[in-house]
Amino acid sequence: MRWIKENSLALAFLVMFLVALGGQAVAGLLDFNDLQVAEGAEPVSFLEYVISSSFAVDVAENWQSEYLQFFLFIVFTVWLVQKGSPESKKPEDAGAESDEKQQVGPYAGPDAPRWAKVRGPRLWLFSNSLGLVMGTIFLLSWLAQSVAGQAAYNAERLGDLRDPVAWGAYVTSPEFWNRSLQNWQSELLAVLSMAVLSIYLRQRGSPESKPVGAPHSATNVEG
């Protein structure tokens, strides 16, 4: 029970993710088969649908937009600040900060990660590992979306007796960028809303909010 409590945030979001993904698969199957029947084609099974390009592109396009949001927020908040927001560093702390403040090299404690105690490429890699991993997942999700999207797009074109398009033509097409940008703009708006609204609004007990009585101008203060 203690392990569950100590990891309850991750477990809660994992369960909600699996439920949402399963719900998307079921709803997507029903919608896909409804279209199949309307076009005079045979309905597909659940397994056929979840391994199809149609399902893959819908999943991948959402994943890549989420990880783009995380990547940009992680990297931009190193240098960019928002006065009064708990999502921002204090203006005077903008930048990569000193080794002493980051507790690396000679300033690393006995319980610090091993690569935080060394110098050179390993320290740089570990110092930027979160942004690098988030950026890599974004690129892989973007690539998966482009490949699955091309397959789904070409299946649709062949159904309309039109010629399929190459990968390069697809990733420069309005279809691809419409899918991408409609997700990107919503994720960027969500980050903007969180950064600005948290200046003036509060959620008691949440680390994403300032203490209820903290002044609006207080920056990098968590409740």
Image: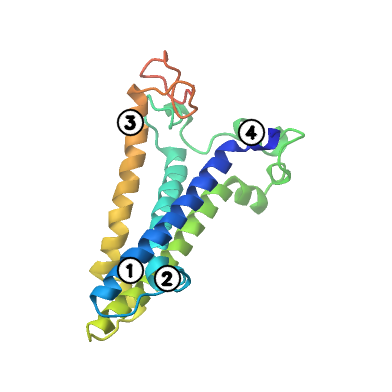
The secondary structure type at the circle numbered 4 is helix
In the rendering, at what x and y percent does residue 76 appear? 42, 43
Left or right of residue 155: residue 214? right
Between disc 3 and disc 4, whose residue precedes? 4
Q: Quadrant of residue 138?
A: bottom left
Whether residue 142 is situated above or below residue 153 in the rendered picture = above
Q: Amino acid at mark 1?
A: Phe
Compute the Cα span from label 2 to label 4. 36 Å
Between disc 3 and disc 2, whose residue precedes? 2
Q: Can the viewer see residue 160 in this picture?
A: yes
Numbered badge on residue 49? 2
Write the residue at 33% across / 38% down: 192
Whether residue 205 is situated above or below residue 137 in the rendered picture = above
The secondary structure type at the circle numbered 2 is helix
Q: Nearer the viewer, mark 3 or mark 4?
A: 4
Instruction: Write down the residue under mark 1.
Output: 32
- Closer to the camera in the image, 180 or 96: 180
Question: Local crowd at mark 4 within 10 Å, few (<14), some, or many (≥20)?
Answer: few
Q: Amino acid at mark 2?
A: Tyr
Disc 3 and disc 4 in contact, CB within 8 angstroms: no
Compute the Cα span from label 2 to label 1. 8 Å
In the rendering, at what x and y percent does residue 176 appear? 30, 67
Instruction: Write down the residue under mark 4.
Output: 5
Numbered badge on residue 163? none
Between disc 2 and disc 4, whose residue precedes? 4
- Closer to the camera in the image, 100 or 217: 217
Compute the Cα span from label 3 to label 1. 39 Å
Instruction: Write down the residue under mark 3.
Output: 196
Between disc 2 and disc 1, whose residue precedes? 1
Compute the Cα span from label 3 to label 4. 31 Å
